[in-house]
Image (cartoon, rainbow, N blue to C red):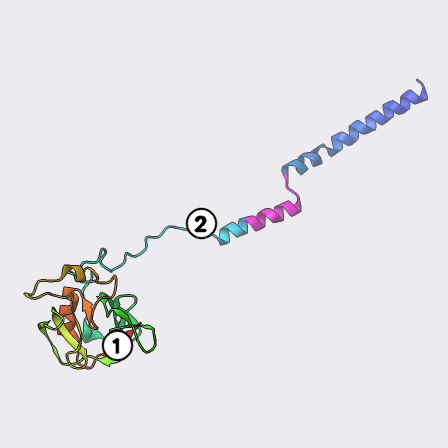
Amino acid sequence: MKLVVKNRIYAGVCLFVAIIGMGPELRNNRQKPSKAARQTQVASNSHRESHPKHSHTTAQPSRMRVPIDWHKSSETVPYPDLATTKNFWVEVSLKKNRTYLYDGKKLLYTMYSTGGMYKKNPQTGKLESMTPTGTYYAQAERGDSFFNSSLNEGANYYVSWLDHGTYLFHSVPTVAGGAYNVKEADKLGKSTGSHGCIRLSIPDAQWMSTHLPVGTKIVIVN
């Protein structure tokens, strides 16, 4: 046999042996990811474990009555028990049309309300509410009903907080004869509309007239 042929046979045998020897390694390389790939996979799995899928939780329903009904209480839960409060006070937000009952910093109850209409101050040119803002204190004057003949308007369940009967918490307004003024009552919790008093729903006003202690701090803000 010629030398050239022998060399070719020898080279072929060597190549065959080399392929057989590398076979398992090639298979392992196909089956196992590289070290870098494994590290990437581990990091990806770790990321998913540290950010689990958000689980749906049902939000607590609002206690405020929706839609607003001036015949009913503003919240669907009982009024607060003032015997258990240590630092009871009231805040009125004119622009938000809300009256808040607090025990210190803790909000106890929210009432839909309507404050004074905004009119332009001729001296400053700015719009100002007919309800004065500032800090006041609940007064002794209170009762079941009143009627202001000069305004042709009255209300039920009132309690004074300024000028001893001038500025009050009271129900949505009534007309002569005692019927409720539905057009004005429908503004409750939605817009301003009073001549300076704070209007409340009928039950809310009754609760305030009955339970608001004399001397309770009342803060009225825009």
**Where's residue 108, x and y in %?**
25, 69
Region rendered in magenta? 32-44
Could you tell me how many numbered marks the image carries? 2
Nearer to us in this view, 213 or 198: 198
Left or right placement of residue 135 versus residue 39 in this view: left
The image quarter containing residue 11 is top right
Residue located at (50% from left, 54% from top)? 50
Q: Nearer the viewer, mark 1 or mark 2?
A: 1
Q: Can you identify the residue that label 1 sits on?
A: 132
Look at label 2 and name its amino acid. Lys
Please, what secondary structure does the residue beneath circle 1 have? Answer: loop
Residue located at (23% from left, 56% from top)? 66
The image quarter containing residue 170 is bottom left
Magenta residues, dominant SS class: helix
Asked if residue 53 is positioned above or below residue 19 in the image, the reply reads below
Residue located at (82% from left, 26% from top)? 13
Nearer to us in this view, 195 or 28: 195
Q: Can you identify the residue that label 2 sits on?
A: 53
Residue extending furthest toward the front:
122
The quadrant the C terminus occupies is bottom left
Q: Are marks 1 and 2 in contact (CB under 8 Å)?
A: no
The image quarter containing residue 8 is top right
Residue located at (20% from left, 69% from top)? 194
Please, what secondary structure does the residue beneath circle 2 have? Answer: loop
Left or right placement of residue 129 versus residue 12 in this view: left
| Disc 1/disc 2 C-alpha distance (Å) | 52 Å
**Where's residue 146, x and y in %?**
9, 72
Residue 41 falls inside the magenta stretch: yes
